[in-house]
Amino acid sequence: MSLSLRILGCSSATPTPDRYSTAQVLNVLERFFLIDCGEGAQINMRRFGVNMLRINHIFISHVHGDHFLGLPGVLSSMSMQGRTSDLHIYCHEKLHALLDAFIGTFEMPMPYNIIYHHLTYENELTLLYEDDKVTVHSFPLRHRVPTCGFLFREKPKLRHLNGNLANELEIPISKRFGIKQGDDYTAPDGTVYPNSTLTGDPDRSCSYAFMSDTVKLTKAVPWIEGVDLLYHEATYGEDNLKRARDNNHSTAKQAAEIALAAKVGKLVIGHYSNRYKNLQPLLDEARNVFPETYLANDGALFEVK
């Protein structure tokens, strides 16, 4: 498994008895990212077996309470659990100030450092994080306050080396990594073996995009085109289209239209208004446009292999 998404909360502004506010943990090649952190996030981490100490990067889309009010509790619990490694938080500068004020109320000093990265809201992809396996970009959404979406991509993977042929040709171990990266091999007698004869195609790299909260934003389609998994808010159904427009949110149908235009693999909808006790109508509305649509319920797990 390359990528998995655990839903910790799927409600909008007001939690319900069975739906906490927006929060997710994304696992990409054993790198754990917390995306938004509404109320109840750490409760559902414990409930669904998420080890918060494995989370090193937290991305907060915007400064509305249902997307960050669970964060003070998470930071406090990490401290009490003995965290010592750095924690990176990507957020609006206003949230930086709020969290500093909260941490200032602690009786004991924090045993770990928090490194803040202030988000920008330009009309383009912005690189936030990169290592040897994964990149994370932000992109602007349109809501009542500055808001970012996030795009997570695996980097291209190494080609598969034909081990039997490599052994037959007695290719040195020191040369094999380069061959996986695309090098040809020149034998001691001068014979050149093209990379295409020594390797097979690499495994496909996986991708995930997060879009909450936002109006239907067609200009985002090129940024998320072809992702394996898309999370898109669906606060309302078409029965509340005017309310969605007035509040700068999307309907389930609009989320599906974005997924269809971007040719994504699967769509997960969430951020439901608490007026919807039964979510089936929202799912039906989206599937009428994009059949590969699924509901983000608390605890749901979505995998890309």
Image (spheres, rainbow, N blue to C red):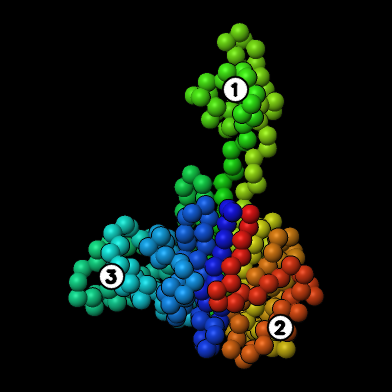
| Residue 116 in picture, x, y percent from top left | 36, 62
Closer to us: 163 or 282: 163
Residue 236 position (above or below residue 90):
below
Asked if the residue under mark 1 is in contact with the one under mark 3, i.e. CB atoms within 8 Å, the reply is no
The residue under label 2 is which amino acid type? Gln
Q: Looking at the rendered structure, which numbered label has been put on residue 113?
A: none
* Residue under pointer 1: 167
Query: Tag 1, which secondary structure?
Result: helix
Seen at 64% across and 89% down, the residue is: 276
Kind of residue indicated by mark 1: Asn
Residue 280's tag is 2
| Quadrant holding the N terminus | bottom right
Give the percent coordinates (x, y) of residue 295. 65, 75
Nearest the viewer among 137 and 105 is 105
Q: Is residue 65 among what the camera can see?
A: yes
Along the polypeptide, which appears first: circle 1 or circle 2?
Answer: 1
- Residue type marked 3: Met
Is 161 drawn above or below residue 150 in the view shown? above
230 to the left or right of 22: right
Q: Which is in the foreground here, disc 1 or disc 2?
A: 1
Is 60 positioned to the left or the right of 302 in the image?
Answer: left
Q: Which mark is residue 80?
A: 3
Q: How far apart are the two marked residues, 2 and 3, measured between alpha carbons?
A: 40 Å
| Residue located at (58% from left, 89% from top) | 274
First reached walking from the N terminus: tag 2 or tag 3: 3
Query: Is label 2 in a helix, a strand or a loop?
Result: helix
